[in-house]
Amino acid sequence: MHVADCLFCRIAGGEIPAQVIHSDPEVVAFRDIHPQAPVHILIIPRRHIASISVLSPEDAGLVGRLFLVARDLAREEGIMEEGYRMVVNAGPGAGQSVFHVHLHLLGGRNMGWPPG
Ligand code: 5GP
Ligand code: ZN
């Protein structure tokens, strides 16, 4: 499903430019426009899913692929050894601002815990 007014559907469809660093039939990854770390990449399914909160059991493989792509990108970006973080914000209270599932891959600096 392509949602016409969804920013990330439009990026996945090539209608809005982004620094795309991975693209396959199911998953697209691109650099965050406001990076919060030296490496800040968003990994998304091509198919529109508004939030992790509305995942179906059938989506399990797709979500697994988001993590595998992110892991591969961590290696390619040179942050695998020092460590990196993968984050999913779900709902406005957690800071979700784009309602198309995305996995943040952050690295290249030390991370605090707990996150804010
Ligand atoms: P959220 O806050 O929903 O977890 O994350 C949304 C992310 O999307 C934010 O980190 C924000 O900087 C990023 N973002 C918002 N608009 C754009 C855009 O047009 N292009 C890119 N590449 N990233 C965006
Ligand atoms: Zn979408």
Image: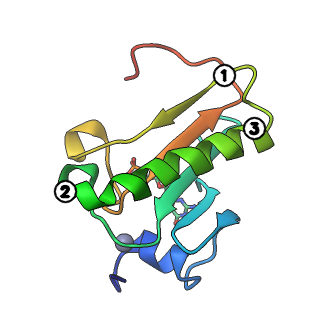
Helix or strand or loop: what does disc 3 sit on? helix
Can you say which quadrant of the picture contains the N terminus? bottom left
- Neighbor class of circle 1 (other Cα within 10 Å; few <14, some 14-19, many 20+) is some
Q: In the rendering, which numbered label is found on residue 83?
A: 1
CB at disc 1 and ligand 1 closer than 8 Å: no
**Is residue 101 something one can see in this rendering?**
yes
Please report the residue visible at 53 percent of the width from the left and 82 percent of the height from the top: 13
- Quadrant of the picture in which ligand 2 is shown: bottom left
Sequence-wise first label, 2 or 3: 2
CA gap between label 2 and label 3 equals 30 Å
x and y percentages locating residue 53 in the rendered image: 20, 50
x and y percentages locating residue 4 in the rendered image: 35, 86
Please report the residue visible at 57 percent of the width from the left and 41 percent of the height from the top: 105
Please report the residue visible at 68 percent of the width from the left and 23 percent of the height from the top: 109
**Is residue 19 something one can see in this rendering?**
no
Identity, as a three-letter code, of the amino acid under mark 2: Val
In the rendered image, which quarter is residue 17 located in? Answer: bottom right
Name the residue carrying label 2: 54
Identity, as a three-letter code, of the amino acid under mark 3: Arg
CA gap between label 3 and label 1 equals 10 Å
CA gap between label 2 and label 1 equals 30 Å
Name the residue carrying label 3: 75
